[in-house]
Amino acid sequence: MIRKRIIAIDFDGTIFENAWPEVGTIREDAVEVIQALHENGNKIIIWTCRGGENLKDALNALGKYQIPYDAVNENIVEVKTDFNPYPKIYYDILIDDRNLGGVLSWKEIGEILLKEKNPISLI
């Protein structure tokens, strides 16, 4: 069986500049790259520490910029596991500003992830 990648993306500092508890400015090229990843069939999980009203603010900001996602802080429906992953989510790729070396620009992320469709083979 073949499936598309599951990409988890951090909110603060990754999609938007970090301005906690406010929503920062959108990072350059984030909208276009995330939309293209989703249009190519990748599943997008928004992964954030925000909750309550702060989470609502984040989801409103994603909606304002028409940034698509399949889940927020939980596994996508298609992922079924024999273990309880909560609160950990399953993903193939994580995009986060806390990566070793920091986060790449969204243009660089797009160049890496959009150059091929990269389906995942399940055995």
Image: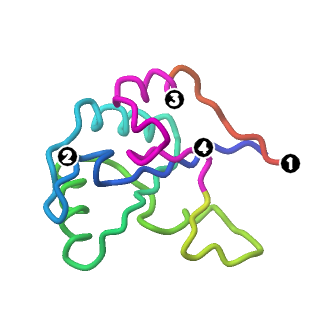
Specify the quadrant of the image occupied by residue 19.
bottom left
CA separation, marks 2 and 4? 23 Å
SS category of the residue bearing label 1: loop
Amino acid, disc 1: Ile
Q: In the rendered structure, are the residues bearing label 3 and label 2 in contact, judged by CB atoms less than 8 Å apart?
A: no
Residue 42 screen position, x and y as percent = 52, 42
CA separation, marks 1 and 2? 37 Å
User: Which residue is tagged 2?
Assistant: 65
Left/right of residue 53 with respect to residue 8 in the rendered view: left
* Sequence-first disc among 1 and 3: 3
CA separation, marks 1 and 3? 23 Å
Q: Is 33 above or below relative to 78?
A: above
* Sequence-first disc among 2 and 4: 4
Q: In the rendered structure, are the residues bearing label 1 and label 4 in contact, judged by CB atoms less than 8 Å apart?
A: no
Residue range highlighted in magenta: 91-114
* Sequence-first disc among 1 and 4: 4
Work out whether residue 28 or residue 116 is closer to the camera in this orientation and state it.
28
CA separation, marks 3 and 4? 10 Å
User: Which residue is tagged 4?
Assistant: 5
* Sequence-first disc among 3 and 4: 4
* Sequence-first disc among 3 and 2: 2
Amino acid, disc 4: Arg
Amino acid, disc 3: Leu
Residue 67 screen position, x and y as percent = 29, 47
User: Which residue is tagged 3?
Assistant: 113
User: Which residue is tagged 1?
Assistant: 123
Q: In the rendered structure, are the residues bearing label 3 and label 4 in contact, judged by CB atoms less than 8 Å apart?
A: yes
Residue at image x 35%, y 31%?
106
Question: Foreground mark, 3 or 2?
Answer: 3
Left/right of residue 21 with respect to residue 31 in the rendered view: left
